[in-house]
Amino acid sequence: MRIVLAVVAVLYSASAFAQTDKPPMVGDKPLVQVKPKGTKEAAAKPAAAPKGKPQSIAVRLQACLDLDDGTKDRLNCYDAVIPPTPKPKPPKAKGVADCRFLKEEDERLACFNGFAESIPKLPKT
């Protein structure tokens, strides 16, 4: 009977020590807990994608065409889809991704407009 009481006392005290305010530790580092993906990344995207279905670059570029032509807002929308990386001597733009190399904002906007307007409209499903 004394052995049973001793075991119960040891187990009870161990459970009391386990219920501290400190995070669980692995060695001398806190245990890493994975948080679900979500709110902050979704709010940062320029064109909101339907849940569960990511939008293609073409659809996001076409969404920028809804903004006023020749404005900074439209250029910012294009830059959010394809971030600019200006080069001193940019190559001739053969594709929409090459527009990011142009340094001048007006040239970059015209380049993006040309490619975005030539993309065929995709059917909405």
Image (cartoon, rainbow, N blue to C red):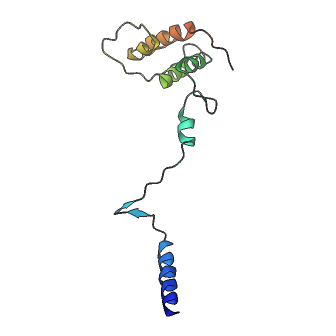
Give the percent coordinates (x, y) of residue 100.
41, 17
Examine the rendered structure and indicate whether residue 7 appears above or below residue 80: below
Q: Is residue 57 left or right of residue 31?
A: right
Q: How many marks?
A: 0
Residue at (48, 88) in percent of width and height: 6
Quadrant location, the C terminus = top right
Quarter of the rendering containing residue 88: top left
Examine the rendered structure and indicate whether residue 18 appears above or below residue 1: above
Q: Closer to the camera, 63 or 30?
A: 30
Quarter of the rendering containing residue 23: bottom left
Residue at (56, 42) in percent of width and height: 38
Give the percent coordinates (x, y) of residue 117.
57, 9
Q: Residue furthest bottom?
A: 2
Q: Closer to the camera, 66 or 38?
A: 38
Give the percent coordinates (x, y) of residue 80.
49, 25
Q: Closer to the camera, 68 or 80?
A: 80
Residue at (54, 42) in percent of width and height: 37
Examine the rendered structure and indicate whether residue 61 appears above or below residue 111: below
